[in-house]
Amino acid sequence: MADRTSSTIVIKGGRPEITAVIADLEGYPEWAGGIHGVEVLEARPDGRPARVRMTIDAGPIKDTIALAYEWDGDEGVRWTLVEKGNVVTSLHGSYRLTERDDGTEVTYELAVDSRIPMIGMVKRKGEKMIIESALKGLKRRVER
């Protein structure tokens, strides 16, 4: 797996509130650019998604994939690709939440590999665009 791309934002809200928005994967098409459909295939006993199918349209990457989620309470979540799509061959990501005096620091890390050959710089730029869009959308959703 290649190096991950990451970015951080501070959101006015506590970890439980932010985690609730992150865990509402079916709501992502309303605020997360590039996500066009989410179907929860399996949920954990606490109701959080364990496995989902997702349709994405993020620039050169248009695909339907399945992801498995591992939750760490309200401190974060990690996901990994469990069913490849036609384009996406590998995907690992995470949100980490750290409380601060002025809100919660949210760090999003992402690494995506695809069947489309891309030089590293272009790939990182695409990952960065996905991350920045998701963090800004998450901030707007939580702070509204």
Image (tube, rainbow, N blue to C red):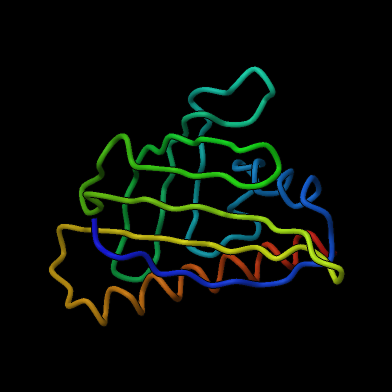
**Residue 53 against residue 41 in the figure, above or below:** below
Viewport quadrant of the N terminus: bottom left
Q: Is 110 left, or right, of 101 in this rendering?
A: left
The quarter of the picture where residue 80 lies is: top left
Viewport quadrant of the C terminus: bottom right
Q: Position of residue 36 (x, y in %)?
A: 49, 53
Q: Looking at the image, which is closer to me, 138 or 6?
A: 6
**Residue 117 against residue 62 in the figure, above or below:** below
**Residue 45 against residue 87 in the figure, above or below:** above
Q: Is 48 left, or right, of 142 in this rendering?
A: left
Q: Residue drawn at (25%, 41%), measured in percent from left and top?
A: 84
Q: Position of residue 85 (x, y in %)?
A: 25, 44
Q: How many marks?
A: 0
List the single residue furthest toward the top.
45
Q: Is 102 left, or right, of 85 in this rendering?
A: right
**Residue 39 against residue 14 in the figure, above or below:** above
Q: Is 37 left, or right, of 19 in this rendering?
A: left
Q: Residue drawn at (25%, 52%), measured in percent from left and top?
A: 88
Q: Looking at the image, which is closer to me, 134 or 33?
A: 134
Q: Position of residue 140 (x, y in %)?
A: 75, 68
Q: Looking at the image, which is closer to me, 21 or 92?
A: 92
Q: Residue drawn at (57%, 31%), measured in percent from left and top?
A: 49
Q: Position of residue 48 (x, y in %)?
A: 64, 30
Q: Residue drawn at (53%, 72%), measured in percent from left and top?
A: 7
